[in-house]
Amino acid sequence: MTSNPLRDPRDRRLPRVPEPCALVVFGITGDLARKKLLPAVYDLANRGLLPTNFALLGFARRDWGDMEFAELARTAAREHARTPWREEVWERLAASVRFVQGSFDDDAAFDELAAALADLESSHGIGGNAAFYLSIPPSLFPVVLRQMERTGMAESTDDRWRRVVVEKPFGTDLPSSRELNELVDSVFSAQDVFRIDHYLGKETVQNLMALRFANSLFEPVWNAQHVDSVQITMAEDVGIGGRADFYERTGAARDVLQNHLLQLLALTAMEEPVEFAAEDIRTEKLKVLRAISLPADMRQFAVRGQYEQGWLAGQRACGYRDEKGVSAESTTETYAAVRLGVETRRWAGVPFYLRTGKRLPRRVTEIALSFRKAPHLPFAPTDTEELGHNQLVVRVQPDEGMTLKFGSKVPGSVMEVRDVSMDFLYGEQFTEASPEAYERLLLDVLLGDATLFPRNAEVEASWAVIDPLEEFWADTTPYPYRAGEWGPRAAEEMLAAEGRAWRRP
C-alpha cells in the first residue's frame, strides 16, 4: 500500500483507517456483543472508518447459519447504534458477516473457524489480519486461548497480524492476574494483547490529558501545594440486573475500583509523558500506581456497603439480598470507598478519595479537584459564609464536560462573596457527537494503537492496591445503606474525620 505524499504521517486530525482485516467475536450472542460491539462496528462503518476489505465473524453455541446471524447483528446494531441508520451501510457490512457454530472445547469447531479465516483471505482480501475479541467469562479464556494456539490462529508473522482483546476483570487477585497474564502472553506476543477498560475510551477521560498538558493555566496548580484533596466518583443508579452470579464472586471493589477508578486516578496524578505515545503514557501511569499508599487505619478509611430496600426515582427498589440469585446471607459489597495517597513529590500529603456504588441517587462519573483556600481573606467572616473551596470537576459521564467553581461578589451594595460555576459541555461546544468508548477502542485495536489499553504491569500494580483491602474486608460485614442514598453513613464519617465532605454531583 502506497502512502499519500500530500499527507503528513504525524497529522492525527485526518481519519485513520485500518488495514484489511477481520474481527472475530467469541460470545457473539452475549449482552456486551449485542449492545456495544455490534453497534460499534456499524457506527465505524457508517463513519467510513472500516477498511473496504473487512469481515466480521461470530462464534457461539447457537445453531445458526450466516443469514440468521446477520439478522441478529442487524437488529442489535439498529437498536443500539449511535449514528443514523443507513440500510446501504448495513448491506455492505452484511455481505462480509460469517458465523461459526460450536462450543469452546470443540476442536472441530475451531478447525472450522481457522478454515473460515483462511477462506476470507481469498474471498474478502483481509490479508490474514485478524483481531479476536474474547467477549466471554474469564474462566473460559484458557480453553479458548489453547484452541487458538493449537490451530495457529494466534500467530503473527511478517505478512499478517493477529491481536486479542481481553475484557475485565483481569483475574480476581494478584496471583490469578499473573497467571492469566502469563497464559495470554504465552499464546499472543505482549504487543498483540489489548486489555480493554472502556472508561479509557471516553472522550472526557482523554480530555483530561489535553486539559493538563495542552494548557499553562492548570499545570502550575496541579500539585500538593495548591490541591487540598481529590475525589473520584463512579455512581450507578441501577442494581446488579441479571449479573448476580458474577457480582457475588466479584463485588464493587474488584468490579470497578481495581480498574476504572484506579486508571482515572493514574491519569489524574501522572506526570507529563515525554510524548503522546502509548509506551510513554503507560510508563507515567505505572509510576503513579506503584506509588499508591493504603490508609494506615483501614477501619476508618476503607468503607464498604450493601444497598437495602429503598426508593429511587419515585420507585421502590429491592435490597441487594432480595435480588434474584443473591444469597440471603451475602456479604458482597455494592459500595466501596477508600482514602488513598500517592507518594510522589507532586502529590505527597494529598488524599485521593475514591468511591463507587450501585443504587445511588444518580448515574455519574466525575473527577473533582478541591483546591486549598486562600491563606488570607481580607473580607469580614460574614462576607464569605457561602464561599467554599475552589473546585475543578471533570465530568466523565453523563453531561460530559467540566465545571470550574470559584468565588465571586454577589451584585449589590455590600461585599458578599459566594461560589459560582463556569461550565463547559461537549454537546454545546462541538458539533460532532462524541463516539462511544467501544467505537474508539475497537478502532484502536484494528489500528494497533495501544495508547488507551493497560499493560500487564498496570493490572498487577492495581491488584497490589486492592488485595490488602479485600483481605481486610474478608471477615467484615458491609455497612447497610438505603437504595437512593449516597452510601453508608460510615463513608460520610470517613471524610468528616479529616474535616471534609463528599461532593454531591
Image: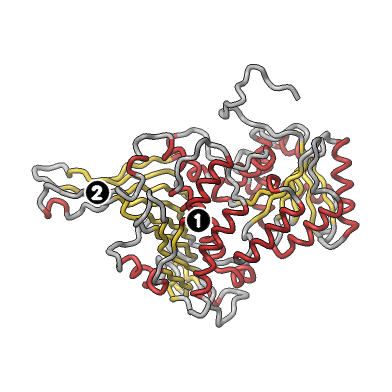
The x, y position of residue 297, in whole percent, is 39, 71
Please indicate whether residue 142 sits to the left or right of residue 450 in the image.
right
Please indicate whether residue 89 sits to the left or right of residue 499 in the image.
right
Q: Which residue is mark 1?
A: 290
Helix or strand or loop: what does disc 2 sit on? strand
The x, y position of residue 353, in whole percent, is 40, 60
Q: Which residue is mark 2?
A: 419
| Kind of residue sitting beneath label 2 | Asp
Note whether 249 is above or below 205 in the view shown: below
* Residue at 46% from the left image edge and 47% from the top image edge: 270
The x, y position of residue 430, in whole percent, is 47, 34
Q: Quadrant of the N terminus?
A: top right
N-terminal label among 2 and 1 = 1
Looking at the image, the residue that sits furthest to the top is 6
* Residue at 63% from the left image edge and 75% from the top image edge: 325
| Kind of residue sitting beneath label 1 | Arg
The tally of labels here is 2
Note whether 402 is above or below 337 in the view shown: above
Q: Quadrant of the C terminus?
A: bottom left
